[in-house]
Image: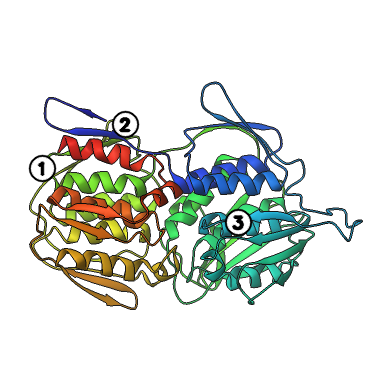
Amino acid sequence: MSNDPNGIITVQAPASKSLSHRTLIAASLANGESVISGLLDSDDITRTKGCLAACGAKFEETSGGALKVTGTENGPRGANPDGKDKHAEPHELYMHESGTTCRLMTAVAAAGKGSFRVHGAARMHERPMKELCDALIRLGVKITFEEKEGFLPFVMETRGFTGKSVDITLEESSQYLSGLLLGAPMSETETTINLTGKKAVSWPYVALTLQIMDDFKAKFRVEVLEDGAWKEVPWRSVRQAEPGELRFIVQPGGYEACNYRVEGDWSNSSYFLAAGAVGKRAVKVMGVRADSLQGDRAIIDILAQMGAGLNVTPDKGITIYPRKLRGVSVDMGKCPDLVPTVAVVAAHAVSPTTIRNVAHLRIKECDRLQACAEQISKTGCKVEQFEDGIKITPSPLQGGTSIDFESYNDHRIPMSMSIFKLAGINPVFDNPKCVGKSFPGFFNEWEKVVEGQ
């Protein structure tokens, strides 16, 4: 962090968690060696590395702080890949509490050969996986559930994707589709993935998956239904995924190794940008791309809509200036990870804010809508929950007080509640270390911003 003569606090964005997961996976499936720089160091990324190592990838730290990745020879390899040793113990894929690792790596491992046991911490065993498991079963994967059908833990026995076509929805999570897309290039035949269901959520995360596949030279095409016929379109042109009107055709051939730098993370930058909106001094975040495909880039649009000042300078950072904030009504279905940040900023506004279309937040690391409602209400604000959203009616925030906030073992709750520090409230967390899931150095960087304010 640094301060300039104009009173602007400058911070460096951490690396993108979403792109770190996807880059690691593509490099680990490629033939040959890739060097990845700017990779996020966090608990979730460590889980993904562990699963990829169990599938046969190798990792080596370089002297320059990058990661050299040696990809699997012929796709993920589990126990007994040749089918000769019926008593071989399945390779362990331990997810801990990383939902992203679980959804992406389950599908990626299923695209390989052999047996894998998929399990995690207690909360992961409560999070639904039936939609993805059903899709993998249709693709030829055998899944044996150890406890409850549709949930971890389970054992997969696979010979790769042998089915040629599969349907998937985005209603619970876009990561189901992303996992299938990332695994499909390892198939021996062309795989068609059809988008079905009633609605699409978090489409930008699918765009990030396609970006990494494209960058690592996986071959695919995207088609939309027009006048009863399928038509190929440039994948970057897709802005909205309409169920029944979009499909992906992925060709076999795998990935090509390459050197890659991971861009900055808009989700974890949101707390610092929010500090610029509610604090006394502007905050500039370096290392995030204004043209990024990350859906959480929407934070600057939402803050500007609430009245904050905004300056976007290509290659020179994003600056948010403090202004009097007003409430907004906003659909955050495409940027759900921003909801805790926006909800806390809303508590600093002069009028109510309503957030909708984020029902899937109830099956994250915790029920994030309930968590936000319970914790923000401790500041005196009125908070109303809906099935798919939340309404925050501000009340004057009382500085000079300490408030005990629950973390729910969910990294995004303490990071977002920390914003109350700028209103003079001293937040005390029961488990601050849970931020290590995505941003281990958060509190060190945050204290610098608080001191700068």
- Which residue is at a point 10% across and 52% down the rendered structure image? 400
CA–CA distance between discs 1 and 2? 25 Å
Instruction: Tell me where residue 93 appears, x and y as whole percent.
Output: 66, 55
Q: Which amino acid lies under the numbered mark 3 shown in the image of this protein?
A: Leu
Q: Which residue is mark 3?
A: 181
Q: Which residue is mark 1?
A: 280
Q: Amino acid at mark 1?
A: Lys
In depth, the one of 396 and 293 nearer the eye is 396
x then y, percent, for residue 103: 57, 60
In this rendering, does residue 96 appear at all? yes
Query: Considering the numbered disc 2 on the image, is that residue within a helix, a strand or a loop?
Result: loop
**What whole-number distance in Å separates the C-alpha atoms at marks 1 and 3?**
45 Å
First-in-chain label (3 vs 2): 3
Which label was assigned to residue 315?
Answer: 2
Residue at disc 3, secondary structure: helix
User: Does the CB distance between marks 3 and 2 fall below 8 Å?
Assistant: no
Residue sticking out furthest to the right: 84
| Image position of 198 (left or right of 400) | right
Question: Which image quarter is the N terminus in?
Answer: top left
The quarter in which the C terminus is drawn is top left
Side (left or right) of 316 relative to 25: left
- Residue 231 can be seen, yes or no: no
